Image (tube, grey):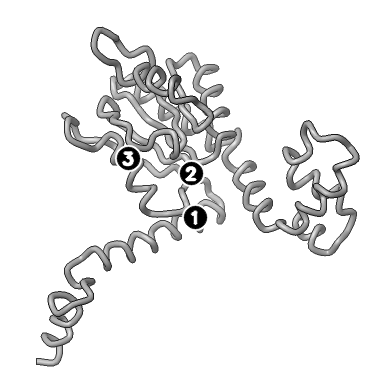
């Protein structure tokens, strides 16, 4: 509703605050008109963020993540939950703590000094036992991390690219992993999540085509396939 009102130019300040409240936090009131106009110009981007916030922060989806985490701990299967937005990582961390679970989180806000300790809290290390059974991670923060202790993974949201989706799983399903891993795409019963999942699946299909032998742009790929069809 707010995005539609902004596009129509109705009460720009009111609907800009409704759509993007964080944009106004900590800013002097004299800057509000300029901020509101900026929100209006980028209404599509802010609408996407607002939808993400409504679906992923609190509500049934987060309750489902906590339930899955409890089950994973009860089964002795440490779990990673990936979320794209910092706000979601922080909300998930609090929800896990409130549920009495041992949890650590890592985001792009963490310094290069902080990250190794947070990863070790989950993964453990020489002379160090893990102190967390659940790790909440943003995509940027976990790049390159080896997290083979994890046996379950939840994609709490859908990343923009299939490559990122694949890299999330690769954090635990790599050399040194001793068990099969369970991977779940947690989706709300809403068009926003369903469309996001379909987008990633379409990108996966394209990736499979271009990474396959038939996708090679030379005589060993497409050329060879066309000759076989014509024969």
SS type, badge 3: strand
Q: What residue lies at 42% left-to-right and 41% top-to-bottom?
A: 155
Residue drawn at point x = 39 percent, y = 63 percent: 202
Mark 3 — residue? 183
Q: Secondary structure at mark 1?
A: helix
Q: Toward the viewer: 121 or 158?
A: 121
Mark 2 secondary-structure assignment: loop
Q: Quadrant of the N terminus?
A: bottom right
Viewer-proximal residue among 18 and 31? 31
Residue lying furthest bottom in this view?
230
Residue that numbered label 1 is attached to:
196
Count of all numbered marks drawn on residues in the image? 3
Q: Which mark is residue 157?
A: 2
Q: Earlier along the polypeptide chain: callout 3 or callout 2?
A: 2
Q: How dense is the environment of label 1, judged by Cα within 10 Å: few (below 14), some, or many (20 and up)?
A: some
Q: N-terminal of the two: label 1 or label 3?
A: 3
**Residue 144 placement (x, y as % from top left):** 32, 36
How far is the residue under mark 3 from the one under mark 2?
Answer: 13 Å
The spot of residue 209 in percent (x, y) is: 27, 68
């Amino acid at each position: 509703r707010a995005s539609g009102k902004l596009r129509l130019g109705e009460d720009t300040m009111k609907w800009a605050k409704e759509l993007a409240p964080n944009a106004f936090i900590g800013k002097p009131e004299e800057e509000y008109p300029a901020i509101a106009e900026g929100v209006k110009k980028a209404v599509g981007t802010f609408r996407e963020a607002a939808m993400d916030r409504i679906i992923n922060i609190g509500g049934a989806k987060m309750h489902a993540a906590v339930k899955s985490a409890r089950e994973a701990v009860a089964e002795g299967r440490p779990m990673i939950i990936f979320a794209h937005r910092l706000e979601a990582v922080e909300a998930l961390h609090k929800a896990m703590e409130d549920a009495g679970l041992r949890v650590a989180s890592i985001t792009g806000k963490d310094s290069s000094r902080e990250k190794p300790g947070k990863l070790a809290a989950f993964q453990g290390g020489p002379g160090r036992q893990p102190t967390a059974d659940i790790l909440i991670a943003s995509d940027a923060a976990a790049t390159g991390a080896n997290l083979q202790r994890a046996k379950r993974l939840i994609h709490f949201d859908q990343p923009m690219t299939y490559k990122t989706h694949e890299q999330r799983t690769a954090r635990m399903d790599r050399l040194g992993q001793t068990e099969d891993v369970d991977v779940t795409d947690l989706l709300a019963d809403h068009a926003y999540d369903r469309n996001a999942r379909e987008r990633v699946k379409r990108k996966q299909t394209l990736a499979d085509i271009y990474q396959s032998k038939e996708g090679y742009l030379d005589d060993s790929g497409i050329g060879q396939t066309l000759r076989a069809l014509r024969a």
